[in-house]
Amino acid sequence: MCAKARAAPPACKGVAVAATDNTTHVRARWGLLRHLAALLGGVLAASGARAVDLPEDSAEALFHSYNGGGVSANGPALLVRKQLADKVSLSASYYVDAVSNASIDVVTTASPYSEQRTEYGLGAEYVYRDAKLSLTTTSSKEGDYTANSVGFDITQDTFGGMTSVSLGFTRSNDQISKQGAPEFADEAAHWQYRLGVTQVLSPRWVMSANAEALADDGFLGSPYRVARVFGAVVPERTPRTRSARAVKFRLIGDLGTRDAVHVDYRYFWDTWDIKAHTAELGYSRYFGERWLADTSLRFYRQDKALFYSDNATTETTYLSRNRQLSTFNSIGLGAKVAYKLGRVAGTSMLKLNAAYEYTRFKFSDFTDIRTGEPYAYNANVLQVYLTATF
């Protein structure tokens, strides 16, 4: 939550045979993961299911657009990757959000506003034998919010490349202010610890399990949001500490006819008594040599925080009417297509991608005070991007 209203080789008879079998398994695994990654359009990369290898030299330009619940956000993004001596890969990114906010929180308690958020990122990846070390840092700034983070990850292949183990850590620090109130200034710190295991089950199936531990400290609410007690407006009061856990399981399979499928499940719980379930089913397929299509269906359900109330009947130490802390569910349907344009002006491959997702949000205990009815809205996300590999 952000502060603004706003996852054994067969027995061998000799050393020579054992070495041959091990190489065969590694090559088979690399081939399987690369094939599945191509079919699933990056799903494997997101899950950590990949051989220890550096990404290709590439450049990517993206335009993104979000519209839903009275909020619109759009802007460009750029990403560049470059290898050095086949051991190190450096990356740099630039991301812009131009936001117009007239959400339910804003229109019922304040005036709509517009702002721009800009984010810069740098990354480095280093491969040594069967291990890959990754270091990333990001910095983002908007009118009343500044966020900086640094992360470190290590991925290690074991058992002849059939199993990958990954560990990661991210530390973030946010500086929060309030427009029109120069006397307000606060901060928040965030820690995230990650552990993941990816296992090749067969020549066509890969499974991964990932766990996260999160801890937040500082100002975790919004200086703009208000709560209600017997219909009267009072400032939101949110605890200054929070810890959470999450586990995610993913099964990915090559169906053998130039298509693949993935099934995901994630469970989240925290010390604010929020419990959330996410389930996703996805399918990918090649059409000819140039077209790749993906589709996915995702369901999310969440229970409310201990101190959440739509309209409290008593004063408590902590009180919030943040709809992101209420009881709600969402259903999202997404589609993505990728088209290989071929070799253009010195590139090894130029690819055009387009992705769209429609999501329906329904709230059980958050009402639109203008109508008195449970709140619901639709959100649309569109991405169009061009990728060039060298």
Image: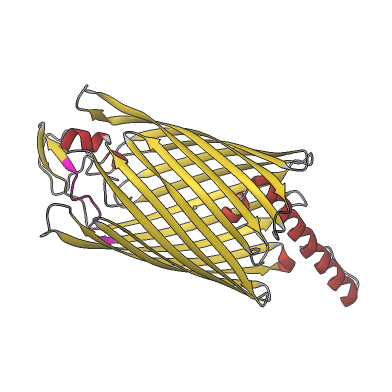
Q: Which colour scheme appears in the figure? A: secondary structure
Q: Is residue 126 above or below residue 45?
A: below
Q: Is residue 38 above or below residue 93?
A: above
Residue 71 in view in this figure: yes
Tell me if 126 is positioned left or right of 380 in this view: right
Q: Is residue 46 above or below residue 70?
A: below
Residue 310 in view in this figure: no
The kind of secondary structure the magenta stretch mainly shows is loop
Instruction: Name the one closer to the observer, 255 or 121.
Output: 121
Residue 366: image location, x then y, percent: 26, 32
Tell me if 277 is positioned left or right of 128 in this view: left
Range drawn in magenta: 217-226
Q: Is residue 43 above or below residue 176?
A: above
The residue shown at (60%, 42%) is 263
Image quadrant where residue 310 sits: top left
Q: Is residue 308 magenta?
A: no
Residue 43: image location, x then y, percent: 60, 49
Residue 184: image location, x then y, percent: 13, 58
Q: Residue furthest front?
A: 345
The residue shown at (42%, 40%) is 66
Residue 129: image location, x then y, percent: 68, 76
The residue shown at (27%, 31%) is 365
